[in-house]
Amino acid sequence: MGFYHFLSLGIILFTIGAVGFLIRNNTIVLLMSVELMLNSVNLIFVAFSRYLYGTEGQIYVFIIMTIAAAEVAVGLAIVISIYRLFGSLDISKIKLLKG
Amino acid sequence: MIEQAVFWLLGATMIVGALGVILMPNTINSVMSLLLSMLALAGIYVLMGAHVVALFQVIIYIGAVLVLFIYVIMLLNLKEGGLKLPLETSTYFIGGCSLGLLVVVVWLFWQSLWGTSFRSETGGDLQASATLHQLAVDLFSQHILIFELTSVLLLVAAVGAIIISRK
């Protein structure tokens, strides 16, 4: 396998995550789609790190993983308070900002 | 030869898991698909020789993030269905624009990378590209500031999550 195999795999994963983010209504699934996209970026970073002989890619991956954990903690807290407020997680029913 | 077989197997598993995340009607099944996808991704990291990243993938993503997802789903006791068709018109519009942008980005990526010579991978695929020692030295000398900032961010996120979800 060459570099392009891993790159293509990362791009396919990112596309699936982006499409999932656009077509689903459930807030938790949206968060999971964001996780998929972050994972694809990690995959591409590690591929670059491997094929360019560097350690920076892997270090950035650690940072991204930490950010993802923080994002999920805050995101799920927001999900819980949304559920408390609306009784549902359907993002198309949350229209307070529509005026 | 066997590495190629493992690569295709893991790649197919990862893509099937990712499709399951966005297509499964039940949220808990989505989380399980995400688990499958992330385990396969950890396998791909091992295949690329990034053993430390694979370890952290399993510990952080599967051990912390997915458990948090499952915890919240069970806490809220969700009963909502899956994909609602037909989608709204604006969704199609935004989706079309995003996919077009994605195609442009991929094209630019390919254009700039095509012809760049990367290391040929004849043998030694499982060999670590950067050892743990190397990684640790780089992380704690060159990147010490970003490391400390990340720890502060994690603390802020933990406090923020508690404050947001408090009644």
Image (spheres, coloured by chain):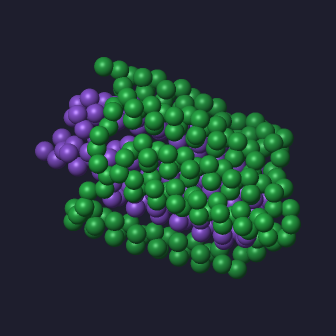
Residue at the image point whose x is 45% and y is 56% from the top: B20
The image shows residue B165, relative to residue A58, as above or below, that is above
In terms of image quadrants, where is residue B148?
top right
Q: Nearer the viewer, residue B39 or A68?
A: B39
The image shows residue B99, relative to residue B76, as above or below, that is below
The residue furthest top is: B167
Q: Nearer the viewer, residue A89 or A95?
A: A89
The residue furthest left is: A99
In terms of image quadrants, where is residue B13?
bottom right
Q: Nearer the viewer, residue B61 or B80?
A: B80
Q: Which color was chain B given?
A: green
In terms of image quadrants, where is residue B167?
top left
Q: Nearer the viewer, residue A49 or B31?
A: B31
Q: Could you tell me residue A84's position as x and y percent?
A: 26, 29
Q: Quadrant of the N terminus of chain B?
A: bottom right
Residue B72 is left or right of residue B63, and the answer is: left
The residue furthest right is: B123
The image shows residue B25, relative to residue A15, as above or below, that is above
Residue at the image point whose x is 64% and y is 41% from the top: B58
Residue at the image point whose x is 64% and y is 37% from the top: B59
The image shows residue A11, relative to residue B25, as above or below, that is below
From the rendered image, report the letter of the chain displayed in purple: A
Q: Could you tell me residue B97's position as x and y percent?
A: 34, 69
The answer to whether one can see residue B142 in this image is: no
The answer to whether one can see residue A98 in this image is: yes
Q: Could you tell me residue B28's position as x and y percent?
A: 42, 42
